[in-house]
Image (tube, grey):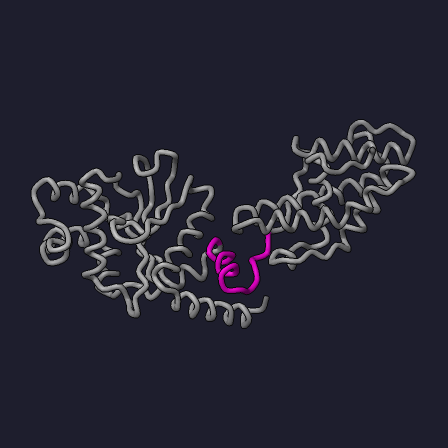
Amino acid sequence: MDNLRLMELMIDYERQILALDDVKLEKLVREWAEQQKTKYHLAKRFAGAGDMGRDVVGFYSESKHEGDWDNYQCKQYNKALPTEQGMLEIGKILYFSFLKKFSIPKNYYFVAPKGVNRNLEAYIFNPETFKEELIKNWDKYCKKSLVPLDHKLLKFIQSYDFNSIYIVDIDTIVLDKKFKNILVEWFGGEMLPAPDGVVPTEIQNEESTYIQQILMAYSEYDQIEYTHFKDLDGHSDFEINLEIQRERYFSADAFKRFYRDNTIGNLLGALEKQVFNGIYDTAKQAYPNGYDCMCSVMSQAANVVPSGKLAVHAKVDVKQGYCHHFVNGGKLKWIK
């Protein structure tokens, strides 16, 4: 995708995000948190009155609010988030943490597509000054909506690490890779491409099943028993073929890993099903040997034309590599 097209998509995403209402922004952020699978055990949206300063929460463990968690406070204003509102929201989360409604959040994110005003931004980037300002002017920012600042609450606020407060603005949303595929789901466009597969020098344990099937296919074709890939030394055609098959396997592996972690719903499963259905009849035909079967299936896999948002990135080597993953999963065999 050229830079001009990318800029056009980014501008469109900005407009779409800025047009979201509060509820839809929260739902978008919840899906973003759900995509951070290596970080969060669970993502939860707390909707409506009584949320105690929580809009979207990412829990790090099964302990939920009794363990580490991040808070995403979503603010969809027609202008930059004002200082007074930002101070109140921080005051609110600290107050209810003080009341032991939940543990104090590990990180606090203001999700404000139009950003925060210069004053609030300055406080966020000067954490100790932020703390001093909130304490000094608690009555101005928080007393009416919460409670007066007594000694116990003061000590609690003083113990809080204001370094853990961050801003998520429109640029962050549009440029974040985990956000990108969600934006595609919501507003259209193209998914990010998966990285290229990297083939390890040594054969990995996870490859044992499909490699064994390939060796059996070679054996049946050549009428020579190959029980180990080292038995192929000196057989240049099979050595090259095995190298190509491993490249295909790891292309599909990189594709699966990337989209498993960066898409929502069953987009990946739907594409895998289309590839399998596309090669099934070819695989079930009669062949003189397993090698001919594998070659025919690989040719058919290259010609499968799947549909859906991932289809444009499912290149020939990815579709062919899926066949080896099907072998690993017991859905396909070269030697019947």
108 vs 62, left or right, is left
Q: Nearer the viewer, residue 61 or 159?
A: 61
Q: Which residues are magenta?
A: 178-194
256 magenta-colored: no
User: Is residue 179 located in the magenta-colored stretch of the structure?
Assistant: yes
Q: Position of residue 248 (x, y in %)?
A: 71, 46
Direction from residue 246 to residue 186 in the image, left or right: left
Residue appearing at x 58%, y 69% in the figure:
2
* The residue positioned farthest toward the front in the image shown: 49
Looking at the rendering, in which quadrant would you find the C terminus? top right
Q: Taking 77 as reference, is 40 left or right?
A: right
Expressed as whole percent of the image width and height from the top left, the position of residue 174 reads: 44, 62
Residue at horizontal 18%, vertical 45%? 95
Instruction: Indicate whether 205 appears above or below 97.
Output: above
Residue 41, above or below 167: above
Residue 170 position, x and y percent, is 39, 63
Task: Report the side of 133 relative to 192 (left or right).
Answer: left
Q: Residue at x 83, y 29 (%)?
A: 226
